[in-house]
Image (cartoon, rainbow, N blue to C red):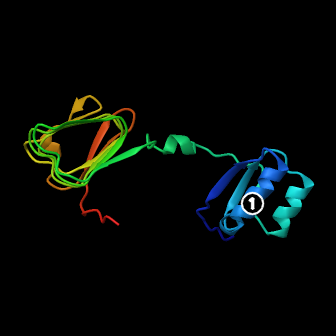
C-alpha cells in the first residue's frame, strides 16, 4: 500500500441560483479549475454538465474537523500599520491587529485589542489582548498580555513569540530572525 498526503485548497461556494453560479464560474474559471470546490445548494443538471465539461473537481459532502476558517482567522478583521517610531508621551489605542515597523521608545504606550507584531525594539509600555504577540524588548519595557504582566527575564533581546492558548501564556524566543518578505 502507498499513502501520500496532500494539502488541498478548497473554495466553499453557496449556490443561490443556477444563473448567478454559472456567471461566477465563467468569470473565475481560470483560477477555480485548479482547486477543489465544495458546493452548497442545488446542483442542477446544467451546473453538473458545466462542471464536468470544464473538468472541475467538486464535492457536495465535506466535513471539516476542528476549527472552522472563521476561528482560524485569529481576530484578523482589520490590521493597522505604524511605520514611524512610537515616541515618548504617545498613547496609541488600537481596536484591531497592529504591526509596528519601528521601535517603541521609553515613555510610549500601546494598547492593542488584537494581535501585535513589533519589528523594532520595545522600551515603552504595551498592553495587548490578542491571541499572539511577536516582539523584541529591553529591560525598560513593560508588557502586559491578556491582563498578565510578562516577566522581563523571560524575554530576550531578539524576537519573542507570546501566545495565549486559552489556558496559559507561553513565551518562546525565536532563535532565528524572521525574514520579512
168 lies left or right of 23 = left
Quadrant of the rendered image containing residue 67? top right
Which residue sits at x=61%, y=59%?
A: 9
The residue nearer to you, when weighing 67 against 20, is 20
The x and y percentages for residue 170 are 29, 42
The residue most toward the top is 147
The x and y percentages for residue 10 are 64, 56
The x and y percentages for residue 31 are 65, 66
Disc 1 crowd rating (10 Å Cα; few below 14, some 14-19, many 20+) is some
- Which element carries disc 1, helix, strand or loop? helix
Which residue sits at x=71%, y=62%?
A: 27
| Residue at the disc numbered 1 | 25
Number of numbered markers? 1
Q: Quadrant of the C terminus?
A: bottom left
81 lies left or right of 144 = right
Which residue sits at x=17%, y=44%?
A: 154
Q: Is residue 41 visible?
A: yes
The x and y percentages for residue 108 are 14, 39
Q: Quadrant of the N terminus?
A: bottom right
28 lies left or right of 103 = right
The residue nearer to you, when weighing 123 against 16, is 16
Q: Is residue 67 visible?
A: no
Quadrant of the rendered image containing residue 139? top left
Amino acid at each position: 500500500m502507498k499513502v501520500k498526503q496532500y494539502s488541498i485548497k478548497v473554495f466553499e461556494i453557496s449556490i443561490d441560483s443556477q444563473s448567478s453560479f454559472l456567471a461566477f464560474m465563467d468569470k473565475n474559471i481560470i483560477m477555480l479549475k485548479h482547486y477543489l470546490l465544495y458546493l452548497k445548494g442545488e446542483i442542477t443538471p446544467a451546473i453538473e454538465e458545466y462542471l464536468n465539461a470544464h473538468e472541475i473537481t467538486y464535492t457536495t459532502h465535506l466535513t471539516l474537523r476542528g476549527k472552522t476558517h472563521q476561528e482560524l482567522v485569529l481576530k484578523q478583521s482589520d490590521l493597522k500599520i505604524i511605520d514611524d517610531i512610537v515616541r515618548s508621551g504617545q498613547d496609541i489605542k488600537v481596536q484591531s491587529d497592529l504591526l509596528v515597523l519601528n521601535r517603541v521608545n521609553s515613555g510610549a504606550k500601546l494598547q492593542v485589542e488584537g494581535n501585535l507584531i513589533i519589528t523594532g525594539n520595545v522600551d515603552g509600555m504595551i498592553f495587548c489582548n490578542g491571541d499572539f504577540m511577536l516582539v523584541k524588548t529591553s529591560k525598560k519595557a513593560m508588557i502586559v498580555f491578556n491582563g498578565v504582566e510578562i516577566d522581563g527575564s523571560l524575554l530576550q533581546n531578539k524576537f519573542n513569540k507570546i501566545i495565549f492558548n486559552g489556558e496559559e501564556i507561553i513565551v518562546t524566543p525565536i532563535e532565528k530572525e524572521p525574514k520579512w518578505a
